[in-house]
Image (cartoon, rainbow, N blue to C red):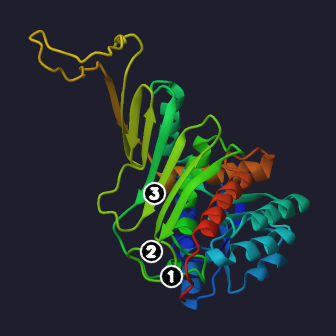
Amino acid sequence: MEKLKVAIIGQGRSGRDIHGRHFKNEMRNHLFDVAAVVEIDEERRLRAAEEYPGCDTYSDYTELYKRDDIDLVVNATYSCDHYEITKNLLKNGKNVVVEKPFARNRYECDKLIRIAKENNVKLGVFQQSLLAPFFDGAKEAIASGKLGEIKQIDITYSGFQRRWDWQTTQLKMGGSVYNTGPHPIGFALAFLDFDPDFEVVFSRLGRTLTSGDADDYAKIVMTAPHKPVIDIEICSDDAYPAPVFKILGTKGCYKSSDCAYEMKYLVEGENPEHEVQLETLRTDEGLPLYCKEELKTHEESGEFQGSAFTVGTQRFYEMMYYAITEDKPMEVTPEQAAMVISVIEHVHAENPLSVEI
């Protein structure tokens, strides 16, 4: 199988420690070779030349326009630069993977999708968590029917930590909803089957522990016609965070982290219905009786093999490879990522924060 040549723009936490790490992993990556790295910082650029043997390095991404051997460009720049750089790469005939967030608003997303189609190139948005084992596990639990009709899904992406980097500023398009939000919002929309009639029924943004003027607290409640309620929470001052997923159905409940899951449910016919009684319940001695019973339940648990950063990233780049080489459809589409940005745009419009930096 012939490898494709990839260029990475940016050698920060994402460009080097997520994308670059994947490409350097011979066990997981057998489809791409890093042929070029673009990095403004000289120290990082020199380090990249050593870490990716044989690659060329540049300080300006426009140098990639001159090369016709680059099959895919990874845009791992500041969030505020995603749109402009991706637009220019697409217009110059490059297949692109852009880090999340896709862009600032839905208009920019739709424009990038249109430009990609007009130039007959592939555009991927790096929402690899949608391909992670723990998300597959949640979907499988729902599809099994063991939980019954799903009424509510809680998604929690919280912790107890403080930041003071560029991700805490509105100037750089930072904040928890733009940075972390694409993961839980992407899950929420997927649980709603990416229904175009989805609705954000409640949202609130705030600041807690982090420096800067961007949000680090978010509560977002979503739903769609005949679909469950999705409750999203992203918070940096939660020392006791809930599970990543908690799924409530008419027959049971499922909870999971990104590593393991537990599920408790009822089986049809094993707990016969009681006839409703309007009079006060009493014991045989005539004393008040609390209405309760011991339900017969079934329990399952297990662990997930791999994470969003290992299995999810591998699956994402396999998807991109076959989209480029065989024109196969993508499991994670830019149209889906654009819906994520629609939610983020809506939440920010409902909860404007003062600009202080």
Depth check, front residue: 169 or 287:
287
Dot 1 corresponds to which residue? 213
Estimate the x, y position of residue 59 in percent, counting from the top left.
68, 87
Residue under pointer 2 = 207
- Residue 306 in sight here: yes
Instruction: Report, in whole angstroms, how far the alpha carbon at label 3 lies from the one at label 2.
Output: 13 Å
Q: Helix, strand or loop at disc 3?
A: strand
Camera-side residue: 5 or 223? Answer: 223
Quick one: which residue is furthest to the front in this view? Answer: 279
How far separated are the C-alphas under marks 3 and 1?
Answer: 19 Å
Q: Residue at x 72, y 47 (%)?
A: 330
- Identify whether 233 is placed above or below 285: below
Classed neighbour count for the residue bearing mark 2: other residues with Cα under 10 Å, few (<14), some (14–19), many (≥20): many
Amino acid tagged 2 = Arg
Q: Which disc is residue 233 wearing?
A: 3
SS of the residue under disc 1:
loop
Point out residue 110 in the picture as x, y percentages from the top left corner: 80, 61
Three-letter amino acid code at disc 3? Glu
Task: Give the image location of residue 202, x and y in percent.
Answer: 55, 55
